[in-house]
Amino acid sequence: MKLSSKSRYAVMALTDLAKFNTKDPVTLRDISLRQGISLVYLEQLFLKLKKNKIVKSIRGKKGGYILNRKASEVKISDILIAVDERIKTIGCSKQSKQGCNGRSSKCITHDFWEELEDHIHNFFKKKKLEDLINQTRFN
Amino acid sequence: MKLSSKSRYAVMALTDLAKFNTKDPVTLRDISLRQGISLVYLEQLFLKLKKNKIVKSIRGKKGGYILNRKASEVKISDILIAVDERIKTIGCSKQSKQGCNGRSSKCITHDFWEELEDHIHNFFKKKKLEDLINQTRFN
DNA sequence: TTTAAACTTGACTAATTTAGTCGGGTATAT
DNA sequence: ATATACCCGACTAAATTAGTCAAGTTTAAA
């Protein structure tokens, strides 16, 4: 059970952005340097974050990114959804008619894994970006 | 964030074993057939479960496996540790002196991910094998 | 004592996923 | 004009995972 770097980077980058979110946009270059994340990789991530209305982009010279909402209104789960992080504990999805092993309708531990998924999701729903800003001393 | 089949199978197989755990040992062949898990794969898993004293093996004809402890005393976390499932949210480990990115001592979201790990671990520690036995109707 | 059922072990492999690069754009403030 | 910064699709190397293969050993029962 492992969190992907993609999600880890997305949360890191947005926490950084939130910290430096004055009225001036923050460039990916700055975030890249401060957090040690590849600039090109950040571009990929912010494209998705923008599509999901987590951030707004400002193009051209002096451009960069700003948060679309206040940090207190951004759930961590919003971020993870934006970059396509999925919590997967069971092979079968809720939609599939087939059942878990293609045999029984539900595998023997189905309910347990679903409970686990909920448990994790709840954590991400409760946490806001703002909660992360002052958690650790910066660098 | 995804649970490996290894862990999923281990928990499934042990739940099955616990259900059929009378005084007679249960064969891997039976578990394999009931749960639709490759027999050879189960052998790998049960080797580890045996080393970690979760189950006992009885060799020879009429042999098989039995639980080493009561189902009410087996934590799900015990099972996951036995098959080497690890919850990894951060690149850096607690031991490493290097820090998360090899730069700062702690990455900006370090504490958050550690909190998430604890959150997940707690779930597995609280749940016992017994809790899973009667959760879903069997097949 | 033979035999078959069942456990034991290590090595190997195909498929998938992930993290990240490359290269060529487009928009806009100065 | 032009430099700065965002935009976007295609590609790839490395790691991980799920699972097979082959060749044993042990032991209860016939």
Image (tube, coloured by chain):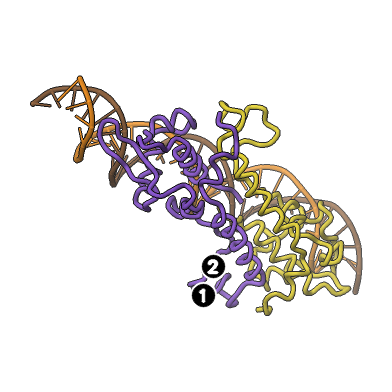
Chain colours: A yellow, B purple, C brown, D orange
Q: Is disc 1 surrounded by few (<14), some (14 to 19) or many (20+) residues within 10 Å? A: some
Label 2 with label 1: CB-CB less than 8 Å: yes
Q: Is residue A89 left or right of residue D9?
A: left
Residue A79 location (% of width, % of height): 75, 57
User: Which residue has dot 2 on it?
Assistant: B92
In the image, residue B129 lies at what x, y percent? 51, 47
Q: Quadrant of the C terminus of chain B?
A: top right
Name the amino acid, label 1: Gln
Query: In terms of secondary structure, where does tag 1 sit?
Result: loop
Q: Is C11 in front, or is B42?
A: B42
Residue depicted at 71% across the width and 65% down the height? A13
Identify the residue at horizontal 29%, vertical 31% (top origin).
B62
Q: Chain of mark 1?
A: B
Q: Which residue is mark 1?
A: B98
User: Which class describes the residues within 10 Å of circle 2: few (<14), some (14-19), or many (20+)?
Assistant: some
Q: CA distance from mark 2 to mark 1?
A: 8 Å
Residue B10 locus on image (x, y percent): 47, 43
Task: Tell me what residue is drawn at x 85 percent, y 75 percent.
Answer: A22
Give x and y (percent) for residue B40. 38, 35
